[in-house]
Structure formats: structure tokens, C-alpha cells
Image (cartoon, rainbow, N blue to C red):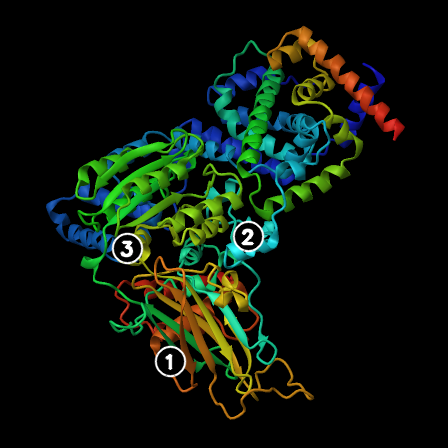
């Protein structure tokens, strides 16, 4: 097996201006990043846009990358923060554009149709609030509770609590679904 | 992990799509571009625009710097070139991508301070892109436990009829017709628009169809003196792309140009209508009916004192060179044309909304210039109350016999603090009735919200103009200052009744967003466009005489057209208008005898109408093409003191070469 440069070395090289290292880093992690974005957002288009946001900001962010953090952990933190920013922006935009004409309403209606098609998965994720969803996405991506806590900047206990809360909600949802 | 979680993990894994290959490529390219920019290698890598204004300027500057005595000849050539750039409208347009050329040194310094800054702005703009609606509904699902649908939470459906009576052209009705994909039509040559999400939207409707005179003898519309569409078309063409079809509003293209029509006599109505006929350039079997309205031009010295409130969007997206810097230059140009009695105030809306300049006499130039120069783009568009404040400032300046107007300058982030189009238009209409008018100046491309601009300006009885170059600013804010700011007739409506015995079919070219119902003509409560001092309005009908081979519909066998068989008039033109401030309209009637022949002014309008239809992909033109449009426009260029018509011919040539591709 060929020795591979570690993510951290690549990131360090990229942070000090090595374009090739940056390209190879991005190539290595793009798909995983996208999959994670999908888990955070739940729709493909949103995930594409979120990934774009992250890609655009990544070079600048990389300059503040500290070697002691594992790159994937760091990348997840960047992604979670970008998702937060995006949600906040959308909320502001929604508020500002409420009622801005039939065009917007039509778009929303079309979006809703799409959302229905996403079957129970979207609905299941939808019964969780943003915090729970972020936590779930991380844990489902094989992060330990400690790592998730580090990324989200909360205590490990909070992660455990959120996970049990998420499980409880999913169970309720499942029960409701089985009844229907 | 419980079974539920495993279920979810499994479902998520199964549902996780592979990333879109094209998006992946783009995103990685974007990241690498930003990465390169961050390393300071951007200067070398960034290509200069092929339009070459920067390259040209650099060349001239280098030449002047290294000038020796032997270089005298070169120097004179350079001076002539620079003079050409500054003096002629064509030259001004050459500079359009480099408005910072003439900005104060500080701006240039700021610009060159580092590419990092520029990139940050781009990233900033990226963050401001419109959200995809999908996430919105998802968020609704997650946040809204009560189960209310996203639709109900986001906004109530707008009742259609009220939109129709509010805005003369039913602009809000036009919006749903716009194909989303079309609106976001990419501009290949414009890197900025290509990389950012394009959130431009344009107000337009399907082209007017041919009407059969015996079924529908009356055609009614409101006048339109906006020019925004022409400037958008020009900016697209000069960037090397055909404009999106919905961006082309033919009436605005025609009315962009000043025409030399006969004005009213001293004791007549504030404007004079005229009609003339010519063979249709693109159809031998039909004729063009040309309707001209010329507003009175009062002596500039006699105009009443003017209260101007600049309401300026200083959000981060305005930082581009063709936005805030161009705006500052434009206002400086305008300042030179105000008189000491006039007053100016400035209100900005952004993170730091507020009054930048208290009402100041136009003679106090240094104070005003300093205030204009101090404007800086930054922060989000947080304009809560910006518009209210502007109106409050305008109200405080108003005195009897003065004219108050707000000039809203923005790049389309219409987050002006009043939620909902209904509330906003009602608010503006109320203020209009109190005597303060609103005009909208659009800057920059990328998220220009043309539809909202139109609605705001129409309800505020103002003009909507799009400013892309300094020469356009010159035209809108200086050459036509008087017309743009001083209304001479309000709610001007046009109605043409055709004689079915003579005219079999007719088609109104353009004015799709301005059509009115037949009964609206006599209803003074229905709003319509205003005419400013010296404005001209032109409308064209393509009419098919009875018996012409070009008639599209067959004559009816059992119902011969009724009407006055022995009357040979083509029809009658009726205009309604209100004196400024009046509530009751007045009527002007002008029969169309059919013997009026068109002059070269009308023929030039016909060339522009043809050009607009070519850009819209009209199917009424047959084989007629750009070459013939160019010939027709060239032959009827007239005096063309400002070079507008010459420029139109250049645009036609550009469109011709782009369409041939």
C-alpha cells in the first residue's frame, strides 16, 4: 500500500499556500462533505448549495486551521457552522420577502411538492429541530459523542441527551406512522 | 444504536445522492479560484476583460509615464484618445466596465489595496444569494409542530383582481408567468453573474397577439416612459450575450430615444398627440400606425424649486464598481444641474440606516459632495424604516409650490422595511397622493429585481431607469432631469378605436405590461403612467387593412363587418390625462384619417420596434432580419445630438453577430 500523506499534512501545506495540496484535499473530501451536507439539509439542491458555500469560504477558513485538530473534525465544524449561517440567512430572507408576490408563492408550492416526494425520510428528519438534526447527522456519520460535542461546541452530556431526545422523537414518529 | 436509528441511518445512506458532477466541478473550481486569490497570485492569473478598458487605460498611462521628447507625437495621440473616451457617449460606454477611472484617488487606492478584499466581497455576495425554496419548506416542517403548511406560514395568496386595479399593467400578474430558468439565463461573458447565483427577475408578459377589429375594436393602454429595459438590453449585448427575452420590453426601448415631435402650443393641453402611417418594414401587406405624444417643455429657469431625497442602498452588494461608485459619480453630475433654491437630503439604508445629510441647499456643494463621498457599502440590507424616513425627510422639506421627489438607488435588494407588496404599494400610493413622488434607479446586474422596480416606480408616479454607465447617468439625471422630476400630466391613458370597415386586424407592439381594460379608460380611479416635462411617448400598431393579403384571419361569411360603411377614417385616438394634482381627467380626441404620412422620426421608432421584436423572437417578422433593421435605423438617424441612435445601431450590429453564432 502506498503511503498517503495525511489529511492534516495536506491541510497544513494548503494553509501555507500549496495549491496542489489544496486541490488534492478537496478532491479527497468533496463527496464525504456533500453527503454530510445532505444529512444536514435533507434535500439535494440545498446540499449542493451548502457545499458551494463551504467551498467558497474554505480557502480563507483554512488559514485558521490548527494542526492539533483532526481535519475531518475541523471540516465538519466548518460545515455545521455554514449550515447554521445558511439557515439564519434563509430565515431572514423568508421574513423579509413574506408575501413578495405570486412568484414566490408558486416557488414555495413547487418546493413543497418535492418535499412530499421525499417520503418518510424527510418527514422523519423534519420532526427534529436543527440542533437534533446536526447531532444526528454527525453521530450517524460514525462520529463519537465526544467528537460530535467538540464539533458542535457543546458538552458530551448534551450530545447524549440530544441523541436520546432524537430517538424518542423518532419513536413517536414511528408510532404515529404505524397508526396511520 | 436502537433500531430506529439504524433505520434512519440505512435510509439516509440509501437516499444520499451522489454529488452532481457539474456542481462538483464548479464548486471545486470556485474553491480553487478563491484559494489562488488568497495567495496573492490573482493579479497574474486574472484575465483582463476583452472589452479592454483597463488594458487601454494602463497602456495610455504607461505611455504618458515614460514619455520622452520623442514621444510627443504619441502623447498627442493619447490625449485625443482620452478626450474621445471622456467626451463622446461611445467613449463613455467603452469605459463602462471601468467606472473607477474617474473616481477619486482614494477609491482607486481602495480597489488596488488587495484582491483579498475583492474576494471577500464576492464571497459576501455569495452568501446573500437567494435561498432555494426546498429548504424553506423543510424548515417549516421541522419548526412548525402545529403542522401548518409552509405556504400558509409564508404568505397569503394575493387576490388577483386587486393587483390588476392597483398597478395599471397587472405587473404582479406577470410574475408567475416568468419561467424561472429563463430569468436565471446565464450571461456567459460575465464572470460575476456566472459564478454567483443570478437572482435577476424581469417583468414581462407574452407578446400582444393580433386582434380582429370586428370582435375587439378598442385597444387601451397606459403610457410608459420608463427606459430600464433598453439599458438592460444594452448591458447584456455589450457583455456578449443576447438579453433574456423577458428583459426586452419593446415600448421601453422605443421610448428610450428622444424624438423630435411637434410640441403643444402655449394655450393647448400639456402635451400634443400625433398620428402617422407608414408601410410596415417587415410586412408588405400591413401598415404601421405611429402614435406620438410630445409633452411641453417649460423653460428650465421657470421650474419650481425641487426637494430631492436620495434614498441610497448601501448594503454590501453595492460595493461593485458599477454600483455605488457609479452612483456617486452620477449624483455629482446631477448636482451641477441643480439650482440654489433646490434642496438635497440623503438617507441610506443598510446596517446603519439613517439620514446622512440633512436637507441642504444645492448651493452648498462642498457639504453635499462630502456626504456623497462618505457613503460606503457594507453590512446587510437592513432597511427597516429607510423608506419611511425618506418620506418623513421629504415631508419636512416640502413647501407650497415646490416639487418633492425621492430617488431610490438600489441594486435590487428591495428589503425596504415594509413587508409585502400590498402594504408597500399602498404605502407608496398614499405618499404619492400627499405629493411626494418616487423614482427608482437600478444599478448593477446580478440580482436586479426589475419587477419590483417597476411596481415601485409605477405606484410612486416616477420613472424606473437602469443605470449601467456614466453616459446613461448623464442621460437620466442631467439631460432629462427636468422631465424625470417634473410631472406635467398624470394618469395618461391611450385608447384607439379602429374602424372595422377599413381595418381588419391590428396588433399593438409592446406595452404588454401596460394594457388596461376598455372600461378602465374612463375610470379616473385607475392609475396610469405619468408624463414628465418634455417627455415623448411613442406607440406603434401594426394594422392590416380589409382585403389585404396579409390578413391572418379569414373574413366571416355570415356576419359582414358592421359599422359606418361610408366612413373612411381608420379609427380614432383618444387620450385621457389629469393635470398634476387634479382628480378629474380630461379627454383629447384625434381622428386617424389614414392620409398622415410618417417622417423619419417615426421610421426610426419602427426600426427599434423591429429590433425589439427580433430580440424577443417574435413570429410576426417573416424574413426580416437585423441587417434590414440596421439599414432602416441608419437611414433615419436624424440629428442625433446625443449619439443615442448611433449607439442603437451599434447594439443592433452586436445582436446580429451574436444571433449568427
| Circle 2 chain | B
The reply, left or right, for residue A62 in relation to residue A174 is left
Q: Report, in whole angstroms, how far the alpha carbon at label 3 lies from the one at label 1.
A: 29 Å
User: Which of pointers 2 and 1 lies earlier in the amino acid sequence?
Assistant: 2
Circles 2 and 1: CB distance less than 8 Å? Answer: no
> Mark 3 or mark 1, which is nearer to you?
3
User: Which of pointers 3 and 1 lies earlier in the amino acid sequence?
Assistant: 3
> Crowding near pointer 2: few (<14 within 10 Å), some, many (20+)?
many
| Circle 3 chain | B
The reply, left or right, for residue B60 in relation to residue B147 is left
Q: Position of residue B261 (x, y in %)?
A: 31, 73
Circles 3 and 1: CB distance less than 8 Å? Answer: no
> Circle 2 is placed at which residue position?
B172
User: Which of the pair B311/A38 is nearer the observer?
Assistant: B311
Secondary element type, mark 3: helix
| Circle 1 chain | B
Disc number at residue B481? 3
Secondary element type, mark 2: helix
Taking the view exactly as shown, the residue that stands out farthest to the left is B69
> Circle 1 is placed at which residue position?
B598
Circles 3 and 2: CB distance less than 8 Å? Answer: no
> Which quadrant would residue B91 be assigned to in this image?
bottom left
Amino acid at each position: 500500500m502506498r503511503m498517503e500523506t495525511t489529511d492534516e499534512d495536506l491541510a497544513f501545506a494548503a494553509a501555507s499556500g500549496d495549491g496542489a495540496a489544496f486541490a488534492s484535499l478537496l478532491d479527497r473530501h468533496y463527496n464525504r462533505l456533500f453527503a454530510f451536507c445532505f444529512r444536514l439539509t435533507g434535500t439535494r439542491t440545498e446540499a449542493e448549495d451548502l457545499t458551494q458555500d463551504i467551498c467558497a469560504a474554505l480557502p480563507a477558513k483554512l488559514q485558521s486551521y490548527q494542526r492539533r485538530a483532526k481535519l475531518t473534525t475541523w471540516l465538519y465544524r466548518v460545515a455545521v457552522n455554514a449550515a447554521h449561517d445558511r439557515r439564519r440567512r434563509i430565515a431572514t430572507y423568508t421574513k423579509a420577502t413574506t408575501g413578495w408576490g405570486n412568484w414566490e408563492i408558486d416557488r414555495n408550492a413547487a418546493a413543497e411538492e418535492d418535499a412530499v416526494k421525499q417520503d418518510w425520510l424527510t418527514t422523519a428528519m423534519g420532526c427534529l429541530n436543527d440542533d437534533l438534526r446536526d447531532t444526528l447527522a454527525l453521530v450517524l456519520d460514525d462520529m463519537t459523542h465526544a467528537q460530535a460535542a467538540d464539533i458542535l461546541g457543546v458538552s458530551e452530556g448534551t450530545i447524549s441527551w440530544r441523541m436520546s431526545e432524537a430517538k424518542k422523537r423518532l419513536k413517536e414518529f414511528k408510532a404515529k406512522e404505524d397508526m396511520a | 444504536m436502537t433500531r430506529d436509528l439504524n433505520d434512519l441511518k440505512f435510509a439516509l445512506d440509501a437516499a444520499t445522492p451522489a454529488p452532481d458532477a457539474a456542481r462538483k466541478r464548479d464548486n471545486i473550481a470556485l474553491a480553487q479560484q478563491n484559494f489562488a486569490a488568497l495567495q496573492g497570485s490573482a493579479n497574474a492569473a486574472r484575465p483582463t476583460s476583452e472589452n479592454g478598458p483597463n488594458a487601454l487605460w494602463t497602456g495610455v498611462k504607461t505611455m504618458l509615464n515614460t514619455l520622452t521628447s520623442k514621444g510627443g507625437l504619441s502623447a498627442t495621440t493619447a490625449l485625443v484618445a482620452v478626450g474621445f473616451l471622456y467626451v463622446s457617449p461611445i467613449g463613455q460606454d467603452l469605459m463602462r466596465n471601468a467606472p473607477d477611472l474617474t473616481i477619486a484617488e482614494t477609491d482607486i487606492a481602495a480597489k488596488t489595496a488587495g484582491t483579498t478584499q475583492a474576494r471577500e466581497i464576492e464571497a459576501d455576495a455569495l452568501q446573500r444569494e437567494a435561498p432555494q425554496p426546498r429548504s424553506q419548506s423543510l424548515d417549516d416542517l421541522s419548526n412548525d409542530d402545529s403542522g401548518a403548511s409552509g405556504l400558509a406560514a409564508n404568505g397569503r395568496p394575493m387576490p388577483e383582481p386587486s393587483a390588476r386595479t392597483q398597478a395599471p399593467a397587472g405587473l404582479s400578474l406577470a410574475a408567475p408567468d416568468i419561467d424561472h430558468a429563463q430569468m436565471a439565463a446565464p450571461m456567459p461573458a460575465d464572470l460575476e453573474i456566472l459564478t454567483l447565483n443570478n437572482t435577476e427577475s424581469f417583468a414581462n408578459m407574452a407578446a400582444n397577439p393580433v386582434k380582429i377589429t370586428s370582435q375587439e375594436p378598442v385597444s387601451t393602454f397606459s403610457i410608459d416612459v420608463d427606459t430600464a429595459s433598453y439599458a438592460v438590453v444594452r448591458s447584456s449585448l455589450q457583455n456578449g450575450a443576447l438579453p433574456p427575452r423577458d428583459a426586452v420590453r419593446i415600448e421601453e426601448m422605443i421610448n428610450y430615444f428622444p424624438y423630435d415631435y411637434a410640441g403643444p402650443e402655449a394655450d393647448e393641453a400639456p402635451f400634443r398627440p400625433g398620428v402617422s402611417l407608414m408601410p410596415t418594414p417587415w410586412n408588405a401587406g400591413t401598415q404601421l400606425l405611429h402614435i406620438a405624444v410630445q409633452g411641453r417643455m417649460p423653460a428650465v429657469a421657470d421650474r419650481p424649486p425641487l426637494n430631492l431625497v436620495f434614498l441610497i442602498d448601501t448594503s454590501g452588494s453595492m460595493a461593485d464598481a458599477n454600483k455605488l461608485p457609479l452612483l456617486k459619480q452620477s449624483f455629482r453630475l446631477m448636482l451641477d444641474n441643480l439650482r440654489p433654491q433646490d434642496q438635497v437630503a440623503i438617507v441610506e439604508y443598510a446596517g446603519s440606516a439613517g439620514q446622512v445629510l440633512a436637507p441642504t441647499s444645492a448651493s452648498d456643494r462642498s457639504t453635499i459632495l462630502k456626504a456623497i463621498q462618505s457613503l460606503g457599502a457594507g453590512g446587510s440590507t437592513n432597511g427597516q424604516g429607510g423608506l419611511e424616513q425618506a418620506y418623513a425627510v421629504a415631508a419636512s422639506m416640502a413647501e407650497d409650490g415646490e416639487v418633492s421627489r425621492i430617488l431610490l438607488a438600489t441594486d435590487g435588494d428591495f428589503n425596504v422595511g415594509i413587508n409585502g407588496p400590498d402594504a408597500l404599494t399602498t404605502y407608496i400610493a398614499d405618499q404619492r397622493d400627499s405629493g411626494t413622488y418616487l423614482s427608482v434607479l437600478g444599478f448593477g446586474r446580478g440580482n436586479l429585481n426589475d419587477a419590483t422596480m417597476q411596481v415601485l416606480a409605477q405606484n410612486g408616479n416616477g420613472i424606473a431607469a437602469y443605470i449601467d454607465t456614466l453616459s446613461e447617468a448623464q442621460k437620466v439625471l442631467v439631460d432629462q432631469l427636468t422631465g424625470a422630476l417634473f410631472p406635467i400630466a398624470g394618469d395618461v391613458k391611450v385608447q384607439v378605436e379602429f374602424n372595422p370597415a377599413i381595418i381588419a386586424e391590428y396588433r399593438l407592439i409592446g406595452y404588454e405590461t401596460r394594457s388596461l381594460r376598455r372600461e378602465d379608460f374612463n375610470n379616473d380611479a385607475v392609475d396610469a403612467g405619468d408624463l414628465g416635462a418634455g417627455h415623448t411617448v411613442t406607440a406603434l400598431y401594426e394594422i392590416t387593412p380589409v382585403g389585404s393579403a396579409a390578413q391572418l384571419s379569414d373574413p366571416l361569411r355570415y356576419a359582414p363587418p358592421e359599422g359606418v360603411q361610408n366612413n373612411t377614417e381608420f379609427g380614432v385616438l383618444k387620450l385621457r390625462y389629469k393635470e398634476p394634482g387634479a382628480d378629474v381627467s380630461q379627454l383629447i380626441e384625434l381622428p386617424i384619417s389614414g392620409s398622415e404620412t410618417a417622417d423619419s422620426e417615426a421610421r426610426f421608432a419602427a426600426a427599434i420596434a423591429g429590433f425589439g421584436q427580433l430580440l424577443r423572437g417574435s413570429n410576426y417578422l417573416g424574413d426580416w432580419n437585423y441587417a434590414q433593421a440596421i439599414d432602416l435605423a441608419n437611414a433615419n438617424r436624424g440629428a442625433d445630438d446625443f449619439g443615442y441612435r448611433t449607439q442603437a445601431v451599434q447594439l443592433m450590429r452586436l445582436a446580429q453577430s451574436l444571433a449568427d453564432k
